């Protein structure tokens, strides 16, 4: 699994499910982690969709500089 985003870590989750913590706290932390991962995924997909539309437009307009700019940005998004 990819490294958890927004500074969540497996160690933090283990602390939350430790003997000094209730299962409700652990469940809340896990829900927060999943929600952040989901929202980040949605944002990334929307960004990619927007960039692909801009790339298509740049191709239609034969705008080489815009095409390069948007493809470079898309590559950066896909790397993350």
Image (tube, rainbow, N blue to C red):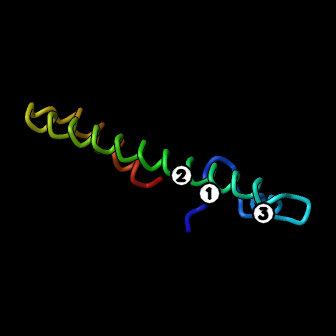
Residues 32 and 52: in front is 32
* Location of residue 15 in the rendering, given as x and y in whole percent from the top left corner: 83, 61
Mark 2 highlights which residue? 37
User: 39 or 31, which is in the foreground?
Assistant: 31
For the residues bearing labels 2 and 1, Cβ distance under 8 angstroms: yes
Q: Secondary structure at mark 3?
A: helix
Q: Which mark is residue 11?
A: 3
Q: CA distance from mark 3 to mark 1?
A: 11 Å
**Which residue is drawn at the image coordinates 9% and 31% (left, top)?**
61
Q: Is residue 43 left or right of residue 28?
A: left
Residue found 64% across the figure and 47% down from its top: 6
Residue 10: x and y in percent read 72, 64
Task: Look at the numbered disc 2 and give the secondary structure of its residue.
Answer: helix
- Give how far apart the Cα atoms at labels 2 and 1 are: 8 Å
**Is disc 2 surrounded by few (<14), some (14 to 19) or many (20+) residues within 10 Å?**
some
Residue 73 place in picture, x, y as percent: 36, 42
| Disc on res. 45 | none
Quarter of the image holding residue 16? bottom right
Question: x, y (%) of residue 59?
Answer: 12, 38
Name the N-terminal-most of marks 2 and 1. Answer: 1
Q: Residues within 10 Å of mark 1 (few under 14, many from 20)?
A: few
Name the residue beneath numbered marker 1. Answer: 4
Q: Quadrant of the N terminus?
A: bottom right
Q: Earlier in the sequence, mark 2 or mark 3?
A: 3
Label 2 or label 1, whichever lies nearer to me, is 2
């Amino acid at each position: 699994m990819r490294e958890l985003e927004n500074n969540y870590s497996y160690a933090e989750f283990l602390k939350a499910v430790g003997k000094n913590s209730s299962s409700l706290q652990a469940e809340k932390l896990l829900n927060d982690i999943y929600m952040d991962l989901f929202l980040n995924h949605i944002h990334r997909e929307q960004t990619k969709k927007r960039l692909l539309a801009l790339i298509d437009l740049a191709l239609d307009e034969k705008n080489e500089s815009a095409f390069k700019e948007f493809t470079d940005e898309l590559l950066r998004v896909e790397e993350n």
